[in-house]
Structure formats: C-alpha cells, structure tokens
Amino acid sequence: MSALLTLLIHPVAADDTRTDFADTFTGVAATEPALRVGELSTQRGDGIFETIGVVDGHAQEAGPHLERLRNSARICDLAAPNVAQWTAAIERAVSALPATGEFSIKLVLSRGVEHGPAPTAWLVAQSAPDFSAVRVDGIRVVTLDRGYDRLAAERAPWLLLGAKTLSYAVNMAALREAARRGADDTIFVSSDGFVMEGPTSSVILRHGEVYSTPAPSGAILHGTTQMSLFEHIEASGKPAEYREIPVADLESADAAWLVSSVRLAAPITAIDGRPVPVDADETRAFTEYLLSPRD
Ligand code: PLP
C-alpha cells in the first residue's frame, strides 16, 4: 500500500495558541528519506501512534483519537501534543485524499533523535485495505496468554500498558502465532484468566441482549471504535457494559466481534476452534453505523 501523503509535523507546545499551523508541516514525497537514522522511534520503538479511519472525506472520531494520543504521551513522559496542530494536520491530510472511499491516517509522535532537541512527528495517509469480505465472512481467533495479569498496569506503570506505543513487535508476533494455529486473529487473555483485547482491536461480546467489553484497567487500550459502538448500542436502548470478563464467557457468547478503526467490526466465527454464532444482520448494522460520519 503506497502512501498518498506524508507530512512531517514540527511539534509546537501544547499551550501554543497560534491558529495557523501551515509552516509547521512539511510535505515529503513517499519515495524520499524523511527520518534520521538516530530516530528513537526506529531504534527503540520509543514513541506513540494513532490510526484513524477516513470514510468518504471524513476523519472518524478524530477527537477521541487525539485524546488517546494525549494520554499515551502522558504515560510515556512525552511532551503533550498540541491538539489544534494535530487537528490541522488531519484536516490537511483529509483535504488531500479522494472525496470517496476508505483511507487510514497514521499519526506518529516519537521521542526524536537521541540527545536531539525535539520530538519527531509525522502523519501518513494511505488507502485502506479492502475489508468488505472480512466484515461479512468474519474471522477465526485463538486465545493467547498475554503473560501478565489484568492488574499489571497499576503495579508496573513503566510497562506503559495503557499507551499506544510504537512497540508492536509482540502484537505482530501474536498474529503470526494465530496464523500458525490456523486462525486469523488473536484475543489476548491475562495470566489470571480474563479477556483483554486483540493485538490491534477491542473485544465486544453479546450474551442475550447485553453487550460487554473488558473494563479499562490500564492494561488494555480504550478503543475509540468500541466506545463509539457502545454509544450507538445504548442509544438504541440496549445495555452495554464494561466488566471483568472471565475467559469462560467467550464460550457462552451469543455473538462476538473484534472492532478497530479501519477494519471496523469483524464478526468472530470461531474461538480456539469452537464455532461462535454470527449475527449477520446486527454485524451489517454495525458496519453501516461505523461507516457513517462519526465524531
Ligand atoms: N487495542 C489495541 C492493542 C489496538 O492496537 C487497537 C487499535 O489499533 C485497538 C485496541 C482498537 O482501537 P481503535 O478502535 O481506536 O482503533
């Protein structure tokens, strides 16, 4: 997938009140080098990111994504992002994209070059993969031990568990392990036996009429797609709750999804080889909602 737009962002202080950020952005041709070899993002994965879906010229949930970027920066002791600057960068990217179709915008904020004067930041906009079949046909998942208990984040904040850091090597390894086991994706399970999240997604279950997702404990990311879908579910009068979900509840689910910003709601068809019922009508309604403009 080639980048449609790459923009270097020269971060300004969070309390900088300027309203025109044009001279803080530098367009870079996708084929040109743009980062220095001393970048801590590449040397150590020391930075944070967000991936935002763009549908027909609208950046979905830009506010919640920037709020999570701010939270990740706080957890990682990075300078707070200037939300107006990042909003301007997103707007500039959206205006450069085609007016129809699905795209993704990745925002990256890194600690910069070792001993360097400033953080490094950039944005990449590209076409989204075609997930239309996955949104209907669904995915098979396996559960994998995350290797720590659900309270690890509070006990060991230096693990940066609630931050969306660039260190995704473990998440990608979990997807390869899923493939080795004949599945498409993973649900991480805490060492004390509770459902956590996917390597790039949140988990939503339905038991009867009640929807649930793991309570944000600091050990998982609070998904913008899950939050948006819960608002939608509650607005239609159905109960949606955060709770501690024992692994056994995966077996009794009447429907289950992995949800994320670009793939949207992928219905789960099997967990560890056991079939899970798929509610095709509801999944279609979720997709329709998630493709509508959302803020
Ligand atoms: N959890 C993890 C670990 C993720 O990487 C992601 C998205 O990439 C999510 C959850 C879902 O977040 P969102 O719905 O904001 O895309």
Image: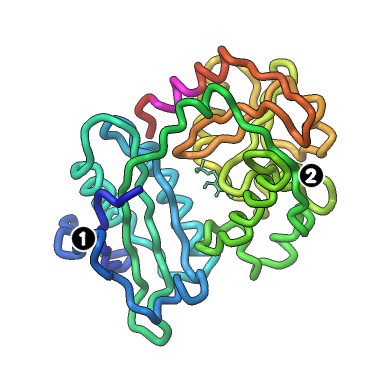
| Residue nearest the viewer, comparing 170 with 252 | 170
- In which image quadrant can residue 42 be found? bottom left
Q: Amino acid at mark 2?
A: Phe
Q: Is 93 covered by the magenta stretch?
A: no
Image coords of residue 287 (percent x, y): 48, 23
Sort mark 1 into few (<14), some (14-19) or many (20+) by Cα contacts within 10 Å. few
Q: Position of residue 29 (x, y in %)?
A: 21, 60
- To which residue does mark 2 refer? 194
Q: Quadrant of the C terminus?
A: top left
Residue 16 placement, left or right of 173: left
Position of 40 with respect to 250 (left or right) is left
Residue 98 on image: x %, y %: 21, 36
Residue 204 falls in image quadrant: top right
Q: CA distance from mark 2 to mark 1?
A: 45 Å
User: What residue occupies the far bottom of the structure in this picture?
Assistant: 115
Residue ID at (79%, 44%): 194
Q: Nearer the viewer, residue 230 or 136?
A: 136
Local SS, label 1? loop
- Against 181, residue 263 (above or below) is above
What's the magenta bit mostly, secondary-structure-wise?
helix
The dot on residue 17 is none
Query: Residue 279's spot in the image, x, y percent?
Result: 63, 16
Looking at this view, is 136 or 257 the one in front?
Answer: 136
Instruction: Tell me if mark 2 has few (under 14), some (14-19) or many (20+) residues whose alpha carbon lies within 10 angstroms of its own.
Output: many
Front: mark 2 or 1: 1
Q: Residue at x 27, y 63 (%)?
A: 9
Residue that mark 1 sits on: 29
Q: Which residues are magenta?
A: 287-291
Q: Amino acid at mark 1?
A: Ala
- Residue reaching furthest top? 281
Q: Name which residue lies at 56% across and 20% down.
A: 283
Q: Would residue 215 appear left or right of 14 to someone viewing this image? A: right
